[in-house]
Amino acid sequence: MTESPGTRGDWAPTTWPADEAAARELRDWLARSDDTELYALDLDFSGADLSGGDFTGAWVSRSRMHDTTLRNTSFARAHCEAADFSQADLTGADFVKALGRESHFWKARLRGANLTSAEFNRADFTEADLAGANLSGVLLTRSTFAHANLTGVTAEKTVLRNTILDSADVNGFTGTVIGPISVIFRGQRSLLDGADLEQWFTARGGRVTRFYADRAERAGKTEGDAT
């Protein structure tokens, strides 16, 4: 059974952050009786175990969570811009509608995570494990998924404009996406869209349809193919 994120009333870190400023901010937030979101900009939570924490709406922009254990945590609607989640364990985490532009998830574990309707433009997911994650409605323009595990991912109207997918494992990746994707194709950097995008996924075990946001875009694409 999957654990659900905890609540502030009964939750405490399994391992507190070693950084005094981060630990102090976390203690002060837990001691409050109101519904104030955690405000933890530019702090270092590295190495802590905050599994099950409910950080819905939190402000953790530019904070460091390198090698932090964050299993089944909620960062729904949180501000995670430029935060560093490198090598963090985010298995089952909730990032629904989170804002994470230019955040870092190098070698992070995001198996079964829910990123629905989040914004992670220009984020770095190099070598991250997102097996079984939900990427529906996510904005991932110019993000990097080189050598990432994207097996079994669900994607509906997911924006992958200029998203790097070099050597990513997309077996079982299903849904609709908005391209073009950026890959090494026939020995050179290429932007693949339309039928080429769909064929790239199919050749690697995925099942993806290129989603067109409106009829005008579809018509433009058709005209372009014809020229």
Image: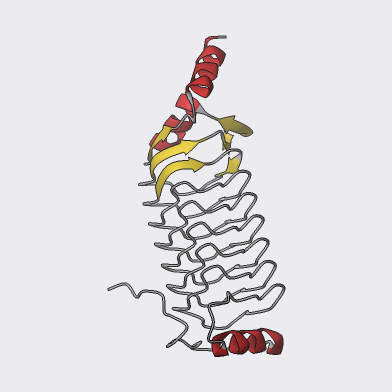
Name the residue at 55% across, 46% down: 139
Q: How is the image coloured?
A: secondary structure
Q: Quadrant of residue 142?
A: top right
Q: Residue furthest front?
A: 34
Depicted 193 relative to depicted 9: above or below: above
Q: Residue furthest top?
A: 227
**For this rendering, which residue is in front, 77 or 4?**
77
In the visual, does 205 lie left or right of 43? Answer: left
Residue 186 at least partly seen:
no
Residue 45 at least partly seen:
yes
**Residue 215: x %, y % from top left:** 47, 22
**For this rendering, which residue is in front, 63 or 193?**
63
Q: Residue furthest left?
A: 1
Q: Number of marks in the image?
A: 0
In the visual, does 138 lie left or right of 104? Answer: left
**Residue 22: x %, y % from top left:** 66, 84
Depicted 80 relative to depicted 166: above or below: below
Name the residue at 51% across, 48% down: 138
Name the residue at 57% across, 9% down: 227
**Residue 150: x %, y % from top left:** 44, 52
In the visual, does 187 lie left or right of 12? Answer: right
Name the residue at 54% across, 41% down: 160
- Image quadrant occupied by the N terminus: bottom left
**Residue 71: x %, y % from top left:** 45, 74
Depicted 55 relative to depicted 218: above or below: below
